[in-house]
């Protein structure tokens, strides 16, 4: 498994038989590496998974799906929105559902946030409930992208049901958990082998670095992999 972070909450996961993008907010992302392009990132992509409908998460989904033919998996409302934008290969789901897409199974969990789009101006377009995403490869560790969320005690059930070993955790505060809360979520509810902090450093009004999160993780800080935008790690 190869994991690449493009800044904010955008990740690329390469596993046997599939290349997955989660929340591909790229061209509008001020931290997206200038050495890359949306077209380059889209090469070989087979699946796009979306946690919710905010524009800094749907990002370049439509352009990438059109270029690559990748299947877009999301909540019903977000998937149908993508379809209305010309994306034909959609896979709508609901919270609690699991779908086997071949190389992996995908499950949607709850997340404590909101979900809408301002792409058409004010007022926002409602796009269902926000989600976290669990990816279960046929062979390899289970991955949990929390989406945008606060801590919630039913994270314990996510761990009981799915036992994820890789966590993608928002830490930037203001719109999601901050460092202290995110560290508590990781340490209390999960047994992660590797943690990738995200949703920080993108805009001035959220935390700019993962330093506070590393401090709050204490003796578990060694599990945290702080990638540079465009950086990758193989597991």
Image (tube, rainbow, N blue to C red):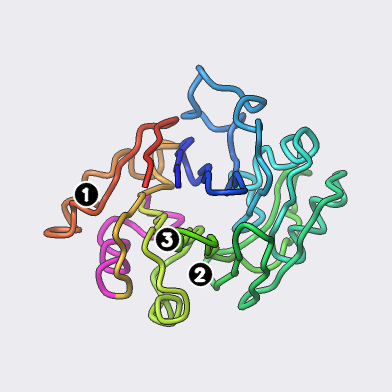
Task: Specify which label sits upstream in the sequence, 3 or 2.
Answer: 2
Query: Which residue is pictured at 31% across the width and 63% down the height?
Result: 192
Q: Residue at x 65, y 41 (%)?
A: 59
Element type at marker 2? loop
> What residue did someone put label 2 on?
112
For disc 3, the neighbor class at 10 Å (few under 14, some 14 to 19, many from 20) is some
Report helix, strand or loop for mark 1: helix
| Image vertical order of residue 135 relative to residue 228, above or below | below
> How far apart are labels 1 and 2 at the CA level?
22 Å
Residue for badge 3 = 141
Rounded to the nearest angstrom, the CA distance separating label 3 from label 2 is 25 Å
Q: Is residue 100 left or right of residue 215?
A: right
* 89 to 164, vertically: above or below: above
Q: Earlier in the sequence, mark 1 or mark 3?
A: 3
Tell me the quarter of the picture where residue 37 sits.
top right
Give 211 or 119, whichever is nearer the viewer: 211
Task: Give the SS element for disc 3.
Answer: loop
Badge 2, how many Cα within 10 Å: few under 14, some, many 20+? Answer: some
Q: Is residue 86 above or below residue 50?
A: above
Which region is colored magenta? 172-188
Q: Is residue 82 magenta?
A: no
**Image quarter for residue 140?**
bottom left
In percent of width and height, residue 170 lies at 41, 54
Mark pair 1, 3: CA separation: 27 Å
Name the residue carrying label 1. Answer: 212
Picture coordinates of residue 19 (x, y %)? Answer: 60, 44
Q: Residue 190 appears at what percent x and percent y?
A: 32, 71
């Amino acid at each position: 498994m190869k994991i690449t972070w493009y800044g904010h909450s955008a990740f690329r996961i390469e596993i046997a038989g599939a290349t997955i993008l989660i929340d591909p907010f790229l061209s509008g992302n001020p931290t997206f590496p200038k050495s890359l392009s949306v077209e380059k990132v889209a090469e070989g992509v087979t699946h796009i998974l979306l946690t919710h409908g905010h524009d800094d998460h749907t990002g370049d989904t439509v352009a990438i799906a059109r270029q690559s033919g990748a299947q877009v998996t999301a909540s019903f409302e977000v998937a149908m929105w993508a379809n209305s934008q010309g994306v034909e290969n959609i896979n709508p789901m609901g919270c609690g559902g699991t779908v086997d897409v071949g190389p992996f199974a995908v499950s949607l969990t709850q997340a404590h946030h909101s979900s809408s789009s301002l792409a058409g101006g004010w007022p926002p377009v409602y796009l269902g409930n926000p989600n976290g995403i669990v990816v279960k490869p046929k062979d390899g560790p289970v991955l949990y992208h929390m989406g945008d969320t606060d801590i919630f005690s039913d994270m314990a059930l996510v761990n009981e049901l799915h036992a994820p070993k890789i966590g993608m955790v928002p830490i930037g505060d203001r719109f999601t958990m901050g460092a202290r809360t995110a560290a508590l979520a990781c340490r209390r509810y999960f047994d992660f082998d590797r943690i990738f902090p995200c949703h920080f450093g993108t805009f001035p009004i959220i935390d700019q670095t993962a330093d506070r999160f590393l401090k709050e993780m204490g003796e578990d800080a060694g599990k945290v992999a702080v990638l540079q935008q465009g950086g990758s790690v193989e597991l």
